[in-house]
Amino acid sequence: MILAGVGACARPYVHPEGDARALPALYETHAVMDDGYRLPLQRWSAGGACRAQLLALHGLNDYHQAFAGLGAFMAARSVTVVAYDQRGFGDTAGFGLWHGRARLVSDLRLMVTLMKAARPDCPLYVLGESMGGAVALVGLDSIASEIAGVVLVAPAVWSRDSMPFYQRMALWLAVHTMPGRRLTGEGLDIRPSDNMEMLRALGRDSKVIKATRVDVLYGVSNLMDQAAQASPAEDTKVLFLYGMHDDIIPREPTCRMLVKVKKAAPPWQVVVYENGYHMLTRDRQAERVLSDIHQWLVAGKSEYDDLENVLTSFCMADSTAS
């Protein structure tokens, strides 16, 4: 009865869609979605012939600037990169609010369609980092026929069934009593990268969210639940990247996903970086990661880890890999 009363006190907020019907369109600095919502974006265009184009989705509390290094690296090597601010992040309306996983996935589908139509001659790939990886996983089946492959960089697959009970209960109680409260994560022993200069720059960037609403964390948890349950598409090429020092997305749920990949036997390639952290494309060894991604995009190959070895060494401590 107490929990039922608590549940009736407050509800997690989901920011509504736009109220205008619009024809989706892709411009140089932004895209317009079917509800009239504007997604700011940045484009790093390849000079000369385009060998591939990459649509990049950022992680929680970040925005398109997360891919500045990746964009410059790829553009210099004949790969065009487009990164957009997902709803609630960067320069979008409803900044700091959760807009719902269905809408995030719908935006991805529309962006894929727009980019494919704009450059049908250039193979299109999707790259999702952390939360962006979860969005890509949830939407994979709906975009598989339009893309050449997906790059998952430390995808957010930390589902509730791999979280401690006390953590799940704390989140449920918080979202039903104080959904608008903002949490900073201060005091947690978390190191998202070994690139301290980059982390200090993020701390100075006003577009990077420093304190996250409880209902946003709840929404991301729902997204991760769905991403972890996503069935690997056997006809879609996937490059899966993860760092052994990742403090954001734990090893156990990551290994659960890799076990599922092994059982389904799709054409996934896996790289586990011994010195890698969560922000692999911005770590101190970022150039190695970017080179691996580029090789996979343009040549379909790189120095991949054997999935069986990953499951027996990196994942050996997890019961899910047994």
Image (spheres, helix red, strand yellow):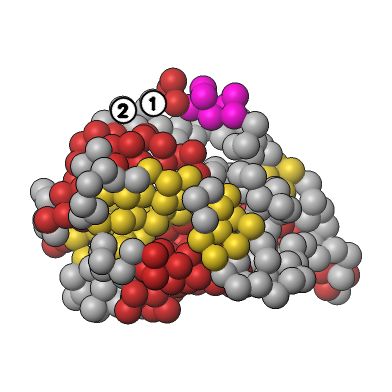
Residue 3 left/right relative to 75: right
Residue visible at 18% across and 70% down? 267
User: From the viewer's perspective, is 277 left or right of 162?
Assistant: left
Residue 143 placement (x, y as % from top left):
39, 74
Q: Quadrant of residue 219?
A: bottom right
Q: Residue at x 80, y 65 (%)?
A: 11
Q: Secondary structure at mark 2?
A: loop
Q: Which residue is mark 1?
A: 195
Return the residue nearer the eye: 262 or 36: 36
Q: Please state the total of marks drawn on the protein image.
A: 2
Residues rendered magenta in the picture = 199-205
Q: Is residue 27 left or right of residue 322?
A: right
Q: Residue at x 53, y 48 (%)?
A: 29
- Seen from the viewer's position, the closer of residues 234 and 194 is 234
Q: Judge whether residue 1 can be spotted in this image.
A: yes
As rendered, which of 321 and 51 lies closer to the eye?
51
Q: Is residue 224 visible?
A: no
Check disc 1: other Cα within 10 Å, few if <14, some if 14-19, many if 20+.
Answer: some
| Pointer 1 with pointer 2, Cβ within 8 A | yes
Identify the disc placed on residue 96. Answer: none
Residue 87 part of the magenta-drawn span: no
- Mark 1: which amino acid? Asn
Circle 2 is placed at which residue position? 284
